[in-house]
């Protein structure tokens, strides 16, 4: 019986040691996670600070560009000039080109319509009949 009791004690000791080792490994995992999170936080902070620094460098140029855009005034003259440019495309030299193209399209349409009609019946004439004889 004492042999069985000794074996039970050994099993209990091994189980306690295994449990203690497992818990200690869990603490190691937790410590590693905390260390990595701290490193990531430091990297994120560094990235944010570098973005702020870069933004500070770019800000004056961006302000200058946006103020130049807003400084442009739309005047009645600029609107009239743009409208005149657009209308001259359709009424001026380009307008005559459009008319020329339309004329050519009409000619092509007429030719296509002629092709779509049934061909005329071909008949032999006397000249052909004599030549065949």
Image: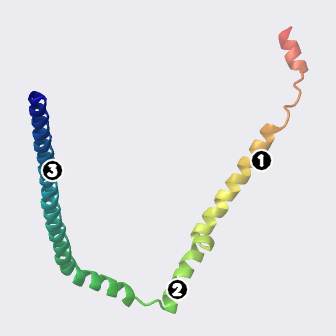
Q: Say which residue label 3 marks.
A: 23
Q: Label 1 vs label 3: CA separation?
A: 95 Å
Count the labels in the image: 3
Tags 2 and 1 touching, CB below 8 Å: no
Secondary structure of the residue carrying tag 3 is helix
- Mark 2 is surrounded, within 10 Å at the Cα level, by few (under 14), some (14 to 19) or many (20 or more) other residues, namely few
Quarter of the image for residue 65 reads bottom left
Q: Is 11 or 78 nearer to us in this picture?
A: 11
Q: Is 126 or 68 nearer to us in this picture?
A: 68
How far across and down, in percent of the image, does residue 81 sit?
Answer: 51, 84
Picture residue at 11% right of the left edge, 51% below the top: 24
Q: Earlier in the sequence, mark 2 or mark 1?
A: 2
66 with respect to 132 (left or right): left
How far across and down, in percent of the image, does residue 102 sit?
Answer: 68, 58
Q: Any mark on residue 94, and which?
A: none
- Mark 1 is surrounded, within 10 Å at the Cα level, by few (under 14), some (14 to 19) or many (20 or more) other residues, namely few
Report the residue that reaches farthest toward the top: 133
User: Which mark is in front, 1 or 3?
Assistant: 3
Picture residue at 38% right of the left edge, 88% below the top: 70
Q: Is 121 or 78 nearer to us in this picture?
A: 78
Q: Earlier in the sequence, mark 1 or mark 3?
A: 3
Judge whether 27 appears above or below 13 on screen. Answer: below
Secondary structure of the residue carrying tag 2 is helix
Q: Say which residue label 2 marks.
A: 79
Secondary structure of the residue carrying tag 1 is helix
Screen quadrant of the N terminus: top left
Q: Any mark on residue 110, and which?
A: 1
- Mark 3 is surrounded, within 10 Å at the Cα level, by few (under 14), some (14 to 19) or many (20 or more) other residues, namely few
How far across and down, in percent of the image, does residue 14 sit?
Answer: 11, 38
Picture residue at 37% right of the left edge, 90% below the top: 71
């Amino acid at each position: 019986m004492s042999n069985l009791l000794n074996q039970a004690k050994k099993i209990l000791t091994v189980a306690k040691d295994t449990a203690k080792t497992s818990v200690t490994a869990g603490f190691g995992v937790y410590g590693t996670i905390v260390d990595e999170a701290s490193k990531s936080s430091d990297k994120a902070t560094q990235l944010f600070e570098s973005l702020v620094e870069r933004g500070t460098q770019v800000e004056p140029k961006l302000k200058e560009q946006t103020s130049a855009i807003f400084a442009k005034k739309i005047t009645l003259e600029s609107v009239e000039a743009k409208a005149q440019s657009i209308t001259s495309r359709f009424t001026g030299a380009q307008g005559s080109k459009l008319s020329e193209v339309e004329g050519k399209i009409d000619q092509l349409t007429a030719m296509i319509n002629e092709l779509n009609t049934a061909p005329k019946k071909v008949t032999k004439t006397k000249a052909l009949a004599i030549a065949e004889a």
